[in-house]
């Protein structure tokens, strides 16, 4: 959440416990090393990177070796494990990519990112003097291939683990918030962006924009794709940044598009009313096809039928959470 990481434990499909962690650190992003379920990373705004080795129960701060302490995105590659850890990629503000091959003990600064021609035009509207790496997506099949969304100004690619970069293409999204790939659809990219929904079928060389059915809700934020069906997609949307993120005037909707459908359809069954709901953060479940999660200021919601219906989870929800923006959700299935 905005002021705290909530560690929520389920057992046998039922809520077991909720614990607050990393309070007052301004958490921004979460990622786990999926080949080692115990390891979780959390990036914070102005409070650096934190690492847990017990599935988020306890945390230690990681020395990034740079002046900035604003971590805005995270990704862990399990296609690369040179020292027994998944390779960690950290996105920063101002825009920077750091890479660790040893679980965070040492870092490489991939400085060529900011030498791209488009970098001179990168700017984050609320703080126009800066910009940041909003999202890092890893190719599910090719080690070292990554896609990086700059907020705002570009979606760029690296094919060698961040050593060199390929700049944005004209047809691509300008303001990607969340980017997805799919194990069953090589080369397919899904972009949920401030300028709409974009999709590429060739690894980002060419893009198509599809906002049919979204109506006024063409400012997109969260995205998740069914792990078993690359054509079943859900996105969270609003009419603009103010209504997506404001605590006082929020209004947001979750939309779905599935096999054979050309238009997006708004979802409602089991979800909170759009008015007063800050834009949702979305994730697919670890159990396989059909399971989705949505996190927002109203609570945590789960769907077991590919987004058609939702159930609010029976988690104690403090009044203070009702005014907080959810920024990241990480669902881990432990053995």
Image (cartoon, rainbow, N blue to C red):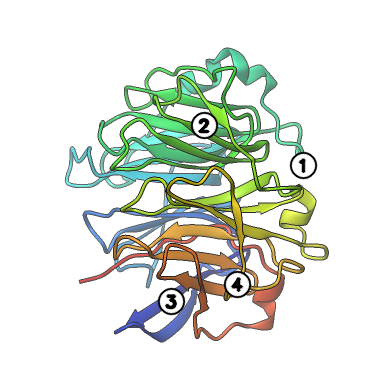
Point out the frontmost of discs 4 and 3.
Answer: 4
Identify the residue at horizontal 53%, vertical 73% (top origin): 300
Point out the frontmost of discs 4 and 1.
Answer: 4
Q: Is mark 2 on a helix, strand or loop?
A: strand
Q: Is mark 4 on a helix, strand or loop?
A: loop
**Can the viewer see residue 65?**
no
Picture quarter containing residue 17?
Answer: bottom left
Labelled disc at residue 126: 1
Query: Sequence order check: which comes first, mark 4 or mark 2?
Result: 2
Q: How crowded is mark 1: few (under 14 residues within 10 Å), some or many (20 or more)?
A: few
Labelled disc at residue 96: 2
Point out the frontmost of discs 2 and 1.
Answer: 1
Q: Position of residue 309 (x, y in %)?
A: 51, 71
Q: Gap in Å between the C-alphas at discs 4 and 2? A: 36 Å
Furthest toward the front, the residue is 260
Q: Gap in Å between the C-alphas at discs 2 and 3? A: 31 Å
Residue occupied by mark 3: 8
Identify the residue at horizontal 26%, vertical 62% (top origin): 37
Point out the frontmost of discs 4 and 2.
Answer: 4
Point out the frontmost of discs 2 and 3.
Answer: 3
Q: What element carries label 1?
A: loop
Q: Where is residue 322 in the image (x, y as percent from the top left)?
A: 69, 75
Picture quarter containing residue 93?
Answer: top right
Q: Position of residue 73 (x, y in %)?
A: 50, 45
Identify the residue at horizontal 26%, vertical 31% (top origin): 142
Residue toward you, 279 or 320? 279
* Image quadrant in which the C terminus is located: bottom left
Residue occupied by mark 4: 271
Seen in the picture, residue 112 relative to 9 is either above or below; the reply is above
- Does the residue at mark 2 contact the one at mark 1 (Cβ under 8 Å)? no
Q: What element carries label 3?
A: strand
């Amino acid at each position: 959440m905005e002021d705290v990481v909530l560690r929520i434990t389920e057992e046998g499909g039922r809520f077991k416990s909720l614990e607050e962690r990393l309070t007052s650190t301004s958490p921004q992003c979460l990622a786990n090393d999926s080949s080692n379920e115990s390891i979780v990373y959390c990036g914070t705004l102005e409070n650096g990177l934190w690492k847990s080795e017990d599935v988020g129960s306890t945390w230690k701060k990681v020395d990034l070796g740079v002046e900035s302490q604003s971590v805005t995105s995270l990704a862990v590659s399990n296609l690369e494990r040179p020292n027994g850890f998944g390779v960690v990629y950290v996105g920063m503000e101002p825009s920077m990519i750091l890479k660790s091959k040893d679980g965070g003990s040492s870092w490489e600064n991939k400085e060529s990112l900011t030498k791209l021609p488009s970098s001179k035009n990168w700017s984050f509207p609320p703080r126009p003097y800066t910009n940041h790496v909003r999202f890092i997506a890893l190719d599910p099949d090719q080690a070292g291939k990554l896609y990086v969304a700059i907020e705002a100004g570009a979606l760029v690619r690296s094919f060698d683990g961040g050593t060199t970069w390929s700049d944005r293409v004209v047809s691509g999204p300008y303001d990607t918030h969340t980017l997805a790939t799919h194990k069953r659809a090589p080369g397919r990219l899904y972009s949920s962006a401030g300028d709409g929904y974009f999709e590429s079928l060739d690894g980002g060389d060419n893009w198509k924009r599809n906002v049919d059915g979204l109506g006024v809700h063409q400012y997109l934020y969260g995205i998740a794709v069914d792990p078993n069906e690359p054509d079943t997609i859900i996105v969270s949307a609003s009419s603009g940044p103010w209504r997506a993120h404001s605590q006082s005037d929020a209004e947001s909707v979750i939309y779905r598009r599935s096999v054979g459908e050309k238009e997006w359809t708004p979802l409602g069954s089991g979800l909170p009313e759009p008015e007063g709901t800050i834009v949702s953060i979305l994730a697919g479940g670890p159990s396989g096809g059909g399971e989705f999660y949505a996190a927002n200021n109203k609570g945590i919601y789960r769907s077991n039928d590919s987004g058609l219906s939702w159930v609010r989870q029976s988690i104690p929800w403090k009044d203070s959470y009702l005014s907080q923006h959810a920024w990241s959700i990480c669902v881990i299935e432990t053995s």
